[in-house]
Each structure stands twice: as structure tokens, then as C-alpha cells.
Amino acid sequence: MTSALFDFDKTKALQMETDFLIGIDEAGRGPLAGPVVACACCLPPSAASSFLDVNDSKKLTERKREDLFKRLTQSDILYGIGFASAAEIDRLNILQATFLAMRRAAEPLSNLPGAMALVDGPHAVVGLPMLRQAPIVDGDAKSLSIAAASIIAKVTRDHYMQQLDALYPGYDFAGHKGYGTAKHLEALRKLGPCREHRRTFAPVKNLITPSFLP
């Protein structure tokens, strides 16, 4: 039996008629290195009042994101996480790799009966027929479920980039998380790209020389 569940900003502007709402968002489309990471998050209405401080991950401090990440992932909410690697990004392009990561994230929740997926951005996820979808532009600012997914995806990716920093010293992945900062570009010019760099992205592609090829 369906019930009216609210997935809302502070004005409760968005309402969907469904049993389960799943917010889907990603982190890491723009960096020059590392994966794109997606999260699918089902935040039950009973838990909503405990997470009213959830917001678009980009509008939160790192400390606040870490706090919310811990609270979200240690609660009884349902979520899935999906990665698409730098190699997959180069092979598929960033949009298709993002869809791949989103499909991988949504798969654990795809059997929830009557579920509706709210996807951040203008596009429904290609290749996800098992879920009804509603793309929402600026969804991470409008939807509590999408905002929660954005936090889990962002912090998961940040933690992964910190691990890569130990594997590939010299690039400062822990600092810039793979984005094209001046320090990152300087390291690229000095060291060349590593296996975690996206070689189809222009700043990396333009620096590749035969001596840097694997």
C-alpha cells in the first residue's frame, strides 16, 4: 500500500507518491584523477527529522560533511555506493561513467517495491529500468534524499583519494582530491600522470609524452 512520502527542502516543496524514495547523486565528475563515485540513499520519513541539517555537500564544511557521513552511514538508512574508475571514464566518457557508477550504487536498492529514484541533474540514469526515475536539476539543494546521497558520495570519494595519496606520493591527492589545482598541475608537469589520472581530460592529455606512457 503506497503512502505519501515527503522528500523535501525546508519548505517541503517536493512530494512524491511512493513507498520508497531513493536519492542518487555523484561526486568527482570534474577532477583530473581518481574515480567518479555515486551514492543511492533511501532515507525513511521516520529518520528525516534527525537529518534536517543535511544539505548539498558542496555547501557544507569538511568537518560537517564528515559528521553527517558518520551519522548517515551508522543509522538505519539504506544506501549503496558505486565507483567508476579513471580507466572506465577514459573508455566511456565522464557522463556514461557517471551513469555506470549510479547503476552500481542503485543496484542494492533496486528491489525495493514501488521505489522512485530522484536523480540529481537533468538526466535520468541510462540503463536503470528497474526503478522509476525523476531527474531534478539542483536536486542536492531541493531533495533531502539527494543531499544525503551527495554527502555519502563526496566523503567516500575523499577518503578514497586519501588512500591514493599514500600509493602515489608527490601529487597531493589527499589535499586537492584530484582537482586541477595549481599544485596538482605542477606535480603533473614534474612527475607525469599516474594510473589514476584521466588521460582523456585535456590538462592530462596535453601533458602526456611517450616517456610517461605505461
Image: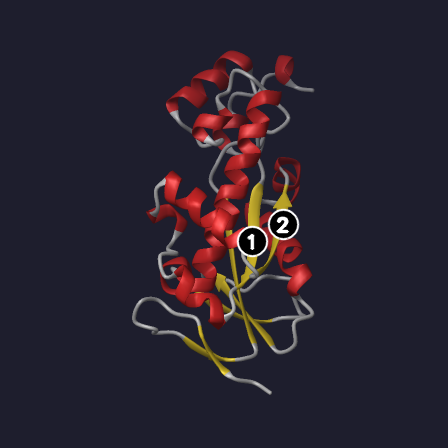
Q: Earlier in the sequence, mark 2 or mark 1?
A: 1
- Residues under labels 2 and 1: Cα distance? 6 Å
Crowd around label 2: few <14 · some 14–19 · many ≥20 (10 Å): many
Quadrant placement of the C terminus: top right
User: Residue at the spot x=63%, y=60% of the render?
Assistant: 106
User: Residue at the spot x=66%, y=36% of the render?
Assistant: 87
Quadrant placement of the N terminus: bottom right
SS class, disc 2: strand
SS class, disc 1: strand
- Looking at the image, residue 49 sits to the left or right of residue 23; the answer is left
Q: How many marks?
A: 2
Amino acid at dot 2 = Gly
Amino acid at dot 1 = Cys
Which residue, given by chain and number where applicable, does mark 2 sit on? 82
**x%, y% of residue 193?**
57, 21
Which residue, given by chain and number where applicable, does mark 1 sit on? 39
Q: Nearer the viewer, residue 128 or 153?
A: 153
The reply to whether callout 2 and callout 1 are in contact (CB within 8 Å) is yes
**x%, y% of residue 70?**
50, 47
Q: Is residue 61 above or below residue 2?
A: above
Colour scheme of the picture: secondary structure
